[in-house]
Amino acid sequence: MYAGVSQFDKPIIPQHKPLLPAIKQTEIQANTLAEIKIIFNHPLANIQLGYFFTQIKNSIVFYDEYFFSLYSGDISSADLKDSKLQGVNLNFKFNVWKININSNSSIYFSKKDFGNFNYDVYKLPEYSSTGGIYFIDTLFNNNLKLKAGLNYSYVGSRGFYRTDFERLISSNHEFIIETADVHPPFVFPTFSPSFQVDFFLAGKIQNSATVYFIFENLLNAKYFIVPYYPKQARGIRFGVAWNFLD
């Protein structure tokens, strides 16, 4: 079993201070992090189950203005809020014969009412999970080290958010509606869960050449992780790396 707590303070980033009210530009962010984890080790398996908690006092939150039915798309101001993130993480690895199975999954305990602004500063999905199943072996009189299998990525539903790439401001911001006379009403979408599966094969020949083949997004899922950058459509990548000299 493992348990740990950390507390520290840090100043507000100078580039963000002009967006804050003058009275709050001297505030300090107080951070508290805690984690407790149960670990099980066995020659055939490694399992880790943990609870994590993060709290930031005076976390900076950015605002977009939506004024008289006109949305400028600019981040015009900021404020300080107390933010909290907590959840459960399960990480396991199983080795049976020449098969390796692993997964890393998290469930986040946060508010889910995206459309009515009733959610935490952290714009995280309800859950996330990554992992895969692999065949690993050495073949042809130890001349070929082979690894082949399937990777997966599963991300739960998420609320709407936007990133200011020009000023490198994180996406944990909200909207200010300056008037109730908004027509049409601003609708905050919720993005459905997404699931992607990839097939890959990699082999190392006599410790000299590495050959790999990847069939990405087998199900041709259409989604994004970073705003405005959709995941690649179904496709194939392959290559060879050869060391001619030691």
Image (cartoon, rainbow, N blue to C red):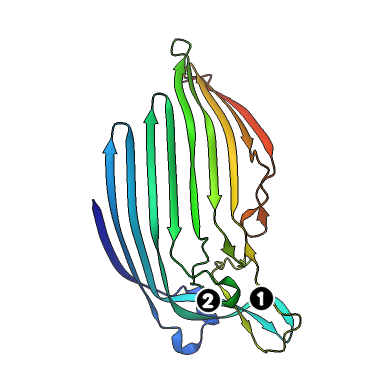
Circle number at residue 115: none
In this rendering, position of residue 184 left or right of residue 137? right
Residue at screen point 50% across, 79% down: 17
Residue at screen point 60% across, 73% down: 115
Q: Report helix, strand or loop for mark 1.
A: strand
Mark 2, residue position:
118
Residue 154 pos. (x, y %):
54, 49
Residue 218 pos. (x, y %):
65, 38
The answer to whether 209 is drawn above or below residue 80 in the figure is: above
Residue at screen point 29% across, 68% down: 7
Mark 1, residue position:
74
Residue 205 pos. (x, y %):
51, 18
- Which of pointers 1 and 2 lies earlier in the amino acid sequence? 1
The answer to whether 176 is drawn above or below residue 160 in the figure is: below
Location of residue 157 (image quadrant): bottom right
Residue 41 pos. (x, y %):
27, 39
Residue at screen point 43% across, 65% down: 109
Amino acid carrying label 1: it is Asp
The answer to whether 174 is drawn above or below residue 221 in the figure is: below
The answer to whether 146 is drawn above or below residue 29 in the figure is: above
The residues tagged by marks 1 and 2 sit, at their Cα atoms, a distance apart of 22 Å
